[in-house]
Image (cartoon, grey):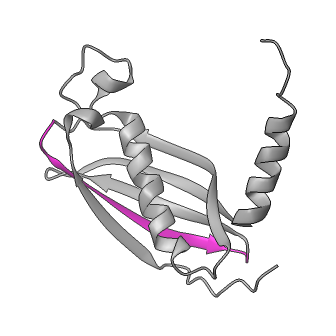
């Protein structure tokens, strides 16, 4: 396996996104909340920030994959507002890292969470996924 670079604990990144229609709860089965930022969109933005913080620091062939996400989405954000997500590496053991995540809009904090990411070989991961997919061939569901 390739040498894994030093990942700095406490390194952080903040990204922002204006809430658009595709980010609203309406697109996730909550038809009564067509103007509110959806929890799945918040999770996706948190994961995006986490991957951006780490993956560019890895050597060619290595990526991170999410293993666990735990969030609390506490406050509503309306269509058109901007959501900011700050992620920070809390711990790192050479292959696994835990990130703290905080989301806020123009008014204040809207959610918090933790995220575990694992460094893996992209090629090896794809081989394992294809091997699993082979087991589905000729299955009747």
Please determine whether, in this image, residue 28 is positioned above or below residue 87.
Answer: above
Q: Quadrant of residue 58?
A: bottom right
Location of the N terminus (image quadrant): bottom right
63 on left or right of 29: right
Q: Quadrant of residue 96?
A: bottom right
Specify start and end residues of the magenta stretch as a single range: 79-94
Number of numbered discs on residues: 0
Residue at the extreme front:
138
Q: What secondary structure is the stretch in magenta mostly built from?
A: strand
Q: Nearer the viewer, residue 48 or 68?
A: 48
Q: Nearer the viewer, residue 22 or 69?
A: 22
Query: x and y percent of residue 54 in the render?
Result: 53, 73
Query: x and y percent of residue 60 in the render?
Result: 64, 79
Q: Would residue 108 be counted in the magenta stretch?
A: no
Q: Nearer the viewer, residue 88 or 38?
A: 38
Query: x and y percent of residue 21 in the render?
Result: 21, 33
Residue at x 48% of width, y 54% of height: 47
Q: Work out whether residue 114 can be spotted.
A: yes
Please determine whether, in this image, residue 77 is positioned above or below residue 118.
Answer: above
Residue at x 42% of width, y 74% of height: 12
Residue at x 78% of width, y 46% of height: 130
Q: Would residue 82 be counted in the magenta stretch?
A: yes
Query: x and y percent of residue 120 in the render?
Result: 72, 66
């Amino acid at each position: 396996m390739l040498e894994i670079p030093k990942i700095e604990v406490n390194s952080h990144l903040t990204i922002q996104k204006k809430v658009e229609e595709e980010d609203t709860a309406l697109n996730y089965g909550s038809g009564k909340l067509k103007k509110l930022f959806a929890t799945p969109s918040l999770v996706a933005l948190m994961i995006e920030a986490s991957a951006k913080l780490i993956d560019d620091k890895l050597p060619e062939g290595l990526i991170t994959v999410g293993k666990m996400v735990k969030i609390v989405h506490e406050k509503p954000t309306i269509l058109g507002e901007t959501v900011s997500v700050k992620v920070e590496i809390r711990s790192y053991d050479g292959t696994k890292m835990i990130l703290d995540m905080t989301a806020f809009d123009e008014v204040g904090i809207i959610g918090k969470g933790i995220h575990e990411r694992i460094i893996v070989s992209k090629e090896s991961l794809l081989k394992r996924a294809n091997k699993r997919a082979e087991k589905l061939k000729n299955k009747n569901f």
